[in-house]
Image (cartoon, grey):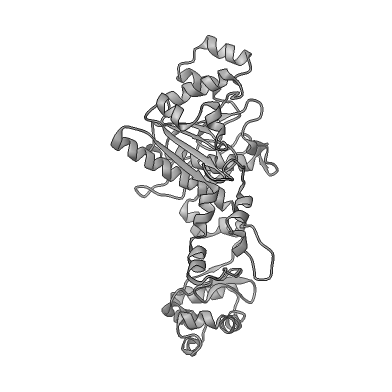
Amino acid sequence: MIESVLAGLKVVDLTQNVAGPFCTQVLGDFGAEVIKVERPGRGDDTRDWRPPEIGGQSSTFLSLNRNKRSICIDLDTPDGVALLRELVAGADIFIHAMKPGSAEARGFGADELMVLNPRLIHCAISAFGQSGPLSRLPGYDPLMQAFTGVMSVTGSEGDGPVRVGVSLIDIGTGMWAALGIFAGIVERARTGRGLTVEASLLDTGVNWMTVFVASYLATGKLPRKMGSAMAMTAPYELFQSADGQVFIAAGNDGLFRRVCEGLGDPALADDPRFVTNPLRVANREALCLAVTALTLQFPTGEIVARLRRAGAPCSEMHDVSQMLGNEQVLASEMIADMPVEGVSDHRVVALPLRLGGKRNGPPRSPPGLGADTAAVLAEFGVGTQRLAQLRDAGIIG
């Protein structure tokens, strides 16, 4: 079901690293034919982001490039540029992550390509956006976490800024780009014409700060770093147990009462300092001491069992290994088999959607560098003689 949504659509993918490849991986998971255009002899930078490795290949590259085909074109040559334009003329979607101005200088700008192919959906991913004084600067996920303030609210009070461990700005930008491309597909079906889509790490980072921006605009006060806690509700953070940590999330007064009942002290919910969420927030320190005094009496597993019986939201604190082995994660089918040459038991994280009650089918392994050059170009009408000439001239690989 999922892999039939975009079946028949051709994507020319001129991205590398994380944000763009994640976007096109999503399109590939939905069934689009993704043609990954790489530099001859080198390819996507993430091919060399190792260790760690799986079967001699970068695990990072493998995690971001399934369901694609790879071709190598030297875009620093006029013949290479002309070849790419031929591909785009027969494609539905073109996506690049060049700095603003670079695509236009090479002849890949939206205005030029959409004259060549009026039905084209043209997507540009950048660091700082397509306009403004910093628009031509490069950017990476941690750099943009710093720039947009994400690091300023991550970590514990008194500690220095902390990077969010996952590449949430890169992945988020890839998600927004994919959503924009889906919007372009809908718009094209309505009007018969393509659409330009722009996504940037800056926009994504600012968007992730939505709640913190709202708080600052409401109070004029900078948000605090609160570790695992949340400023506007309590208890809503990690607590120490007898053998580890447990996250307790009491988002309203009724849930707080269930937490108290589950931990064996129902009277705590009637403490005048804690009867409403605003009071609990105002008396957060005393509240945390009171709740911790209860959680320290039990091991994590017992706390989770007691709170779930009481109907109170909670969770063990998992590491990656514990998460992967959890029965609920196994039942979710979010970890899919994707064999890699020389490695039969390789697994990847699946597309986090079900359509019609089903996930998409088994993924195709990421392609070897340039593995599909000849086949793809032949499909676009490049004859055998020209292929040989291009190969001899070093234009393709």
x, y percent for residue 307: 49, 75
Q: Say if residue 160 shows up in the picture.
A: yes
**Left or right relative to 31: residue 131:** right
Q: Quadrant of residue 187?
A: top left
Q: Residue at (62%, 28%) from the top-left corner?
A: 39
- The image quadrant that residue 113 belongs to is top left
Q: Is residue 30 above or below residue 318?
A: above
- Quarter holding the N terminus is top left
Q: Residue at x 62, y 80 (%)?
A: 296
Which residue sits furthest front? Answer: 133
User: Which residue does the image show at 37% across and 42% down from the upper left?
Assistant: 183
Residue 202: x percent and y percent? 54, 50
Q: Is residue 296 above or below residue 245?
A: below
Camera-side residue: 333 or 180? Answer: 180
Q: In the image, 176: left or right of 388? A: left
Q: Position of residue 38 (x, y in %)?
A: 59, 29
Identify which residue, 358 or 45, lies in the foreground. 45
Q: State which quarter of the image contains the C terminus.
A: top right
Q: Quadrant of residue 374?
A: top right
Residue 247, given in percent of the width and then of the height, sits at: 55, 70
Query: Which one is nearer the viewer's eye here, 344 or 102?
Result: 102
